[in-house]
Image (spheres, rainbow, N blue to C red):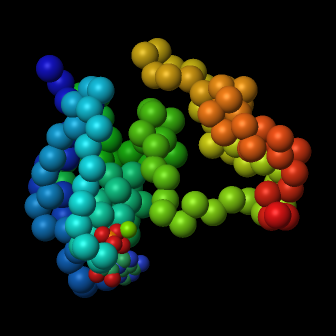
Amino acid sequence: MTPLLKVERLNAYYGRAQILFDVSFEVGRGEVVALMGRNGAGKSTTMKAIMNMMPRKSGDIAFMGERIDAWPTHRIARAGLGYVPEDRRVFGDLTVMENLDTGRQPPRDGAPSWTPNKLFRVFPNLGEMRENVAGRA
Ligand SMILES: Nc1ncnc2c1ncn2[C@@H]1O[C@H](COP(=O)(O)OP(=O)(O)O)[C@@H](O)[C@H]1O
Ligand SMILES: [Mg+2]
């Protein structure tokens, strides 16, 4: 079966420093895969390279059987591949609800669709704060 995500010989650079050296892996449909390594090993760089957020990179990346490595980041995101950066920042001037709206995607076939109400059932505290400005405690 075609893997959900297939990464082959991924190399990535910051300036002249090469960070990734021929990284290859696959993620199957329904699989949960963790990439582990010490601080500075290149985990975030791997994710940024997949999302085409690196200044220079090479390699073959296929998502649901389609090559995405030349696509701009917004197109990759629209295809359904998300990247949640480690620093978890929010837009301080927007409300909780508006912050959620910035990351929402239209429903897609076969993908779980998150509505605010489903989310607030999982995180009830967030539901109570939906109209609060995110930058205020
Ligand atoms: N913006 C950047 N400019 C230059 N080097 C960077 C930058 N971001 C990360 N690096 C370097 O790339 C390497 C991998 O970093 P990173 O992918 O953030 O590691 P991890 O996420 O595994 O902790 C480290 O040596 C780090 O110093
Ligand atoms: Mg990191």
Q: Is residue 66 above or below residue 56?
A: above
Q: How many marks?
A: 0
Q: Is residue 17 visible?
A: yes
Could you tell whether 72 is left or right of 63 in the image?
right
Position of residue 37 in the picture relative to residue 100 (left or right): left
Specify the quadrant that holds the C terminus: bottom right
Q: In what quadrant does ligand 2 lie?
A: bottom left
Rendered residue at 70%/42% (across/down): 100
At 25% across and 84% down in the image, what residue appears?
A: 16
Query: Which image quarter: residue 66?
Result: top left
Residue 131 spot, x, y in % from top left: 88, 45
Is residue 12 something one can see in this rendering?
Answer: no
Q: Nearer the viewer, residue 15 or 27?
A: 27
- At 69% from the left and 59% from the top, the residue drawn is 90
For this orientation, the residue located farthest to the top is 109
Above or below residue 12? Residue 7 is above
Q: Can you say which quadrant of the picture contains the N terminus?
A: top left
Residue furthest to the bottom in view is: 16
Q: Nearer the viewer, residue 59 or 127?
A: 127
Residue visible at 50% across and 22% down in the picture:
112
Could you tell whether 32 is left or right of 120 in the image? left
Q: Where is residue 135 shown, x and y percent of the image?
A: 80, 64
Q: Measuring from the top left, give residue 78's x and y in whole percent.
A: 50, 36
As drawn, is 5 to the left or to the right of 125? Answer: left
Q: Nearer the viewer, residue 70 or 96?
A: 96
- Asked which quadrant contains residue 136, the reply is bottom right
Q: Position of residue 122 (x, y in %)?
A: 62, 33
Answer above or below: position of 119 versus 112.
below
